[in-house]
Image: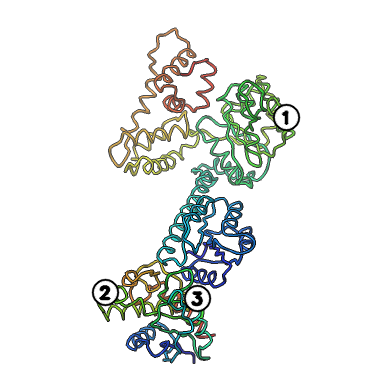
Amino acid sequence: MKTHWHILVVDDEEVMCESLAAWLREDGYSVDTASSGRAAVDKATGRDYAIYFVDLKMPGGLDGIETMMQIRRLHPDASIIIITAYATVDTAITAIKEGAQEYIVKPCNPEEISLLVSRIIKVKNLQRENTILRKKLQRQYCVQDVISKNPRMHELLKLCDEVSSLRSTVLIQGESGTGKEMIARAIHNAGDRASKPFVAVSCAALAETLLESELFGYEKGAFTGASQQKAGKFEMADGGTIFLDEIGDISPKLQVDLLRVLQDRSFYRVGGGQEVRVDVRVIAATHVNLQEAVGEGKFRDDLFYRLNVIEIRLPPLRERREDVPLLAQHFLERLAHELGKDVREISEDALKLLMDHDWPGNVRELENAVERAMVTSRGKTLGPEDFAFLAQNGASTKAPRFPVGVSLQEMEKQLITVTLDRTEGNIKEAASVLGIDRSTLYEKIKKYEIPRG
Amino acid sequence: MKYLYVGGLGPAADREALARIRERVAAEFPAPVREIELPDVEFAYDVGRRQHKSIEVLEMLARQSPPDAHKLLAVTERDLFIPVLTFVFGQAQLNGRVAVVSLARLRQEFYGLPENREVFLERVEKEALHETGHTYGLVHCADGSCAMSLATNVRQIDRKRAAFCAACEGHLRRGAERGLRE
């Protein structure tokens, strides 16, 4: 339907205005008219039109070009067609220079005007479709989208929904690959902050000083290279949610800073003396047991209690094995589309194999396994042979090739170094090969002081 | 009882075309059709453009419309225009009472081609349905074969059928029933 597209016709000659409006209405558009530039700007203040037809010569007040400039100030992307009775190159150039999309010389051939309008509307339709798709994409993580028939997961999702509109801090605990960020996004999207930013920060990925300026921003001159003021993630998330992944890894100093943000909802930029106030909901996540870390004195208890207002514990996949077939089928369908492969199902034998596996890397590992099987499979059904690598991976860990006498830590360090070497420093790829998530890999790189690239 | 009046503007209007229009609109629209004599439109002549102003023609028709006219469709030999366009094949009051169709550009001779009565009469039927359709609130249809699709040249008119698509037909029936009741 075209009726949802509104067009404004601006001309001081009533007959010109009304006849074009009538012609466009017959074409199905909703058309408003304005008899002066001023009236047009007033109308454009109230709403943005899909197309503006503006007559170039209008006596007194604003002429066509001035009217166009004022409309463009209100709506920078406005599609404006200048109507002129004089086909001079000068006026055409001026009109286009000032931002007119097209100009038509009246009287104009009906075919020309019809093509012009349909071309602009086609672009508008695509822009609108793009906006809708973007919205859909941003909302892809909804509580309803979580695939599970596990009663514990259902309880947990109910809790997510209930707490979504509160500002209380949420602490999500779970092993790597259990979907902590997905749950954080689902909580954000279900609540009244959904239209505001969701900013995710991996605390394990950055060194202390970098993380501090990343979180709180910095003032110009705060350190070498700080050539201008920069807003931190907390400021970027104002009105929305900040997701602090691997919170267990932050330094004692940052723990103090974070505690203050949670208490006062304010902080100072690095090198700054002016307090910055924000309205941010904090969702933190960790794969380590924070309570144990508190007991060991590695994590401040006051910060732990501030974070742990609402606690969500995501069960590992091995504790919800009934979800494995559902998740595997879901990944298969999605990846078939993405990879352009006509693989339709997973055989019962293969499903049994998948359900028996322990999935130390949880849902993420399952997703990687399905993808790997699909890439190498030649049939329409994935069989147990397509997942043979799962058993091989297990076997290789059972029979290490390292000589006896090397410590476990040394083995891990060497394995990570070699893997990073193979992937030419690509963290994502290396983490996938090692079957761990990126934050864990960052943590280990930091721990073993492995040089990168 | 309300009627759908069909008439030529001035004595020069093609009699055969008028007869075909009456027959076609009687088949497509729910109101009974009546003939009407209408004055010529010399008053609407624009010396500069050497064409007739269709808006002034519509205004005159609205004034001359008989009290028992449900709709009034006028046909003229004159070439019509609206100020912003070089010409129009016809014009109607959207959701209104009156409409006009110009025969001038429907003839093959206008384009320097030999006369073809059948092609001409088919175009006349389609344009009559199109403009009358507008008075029933129909807007341009995306189906290029429907009489309500937009035609800015005769090739596009020739691609249409002298009938409405199912969607326009449905809209027309509902609108017409409402209109006749009022």
Q: Residues within 10 Å of mark 2 (few under 14, many from 20)?
A: few
Q: Residue at x 51, y 88 (%)?
A: B65
Give the x, y percent position of residue B101.
41, 80
Pointers 3 and 2 in contact (C-beta within 8 Å): no
Q: Looking at the figure, which quarter contains the C terminus of chain B?
A: bottom right
* Same-chain status of marks 2 and 1: no
> In terms of depth relative to the viewer, which is nearer, B152 or A440?
B152
Q: Under tag 2, what secondary structure?
A: loop
Which of label 1 and label 3 is nearer to you? 3
**Does residue A188 lie above or below A57 as drawn?**
above
Label 3 crowd (10 A; few <14 / some 14-19 / many >=20): many
Protein chain holding label 1 = A
Q: Position of residue A88 (x, y in %)?
A: 47, 58
Q: Which mark, by number, is residue B94? A: 3
Q: Which mark is residue A260?
A: 1
Q: CA distance from mark 3 to mark 2?
A: 33 Å
> In x, y percent, where is residue B48?
46, 74
Between marks 2 and 1, how big is the CA–CA gap?
87 Å
Check disc 2 and report the residue beneath it. B113
| Figure quadrant of residue A278 | top right
Q: Is residue A442 left or right of residue A266?
A: left
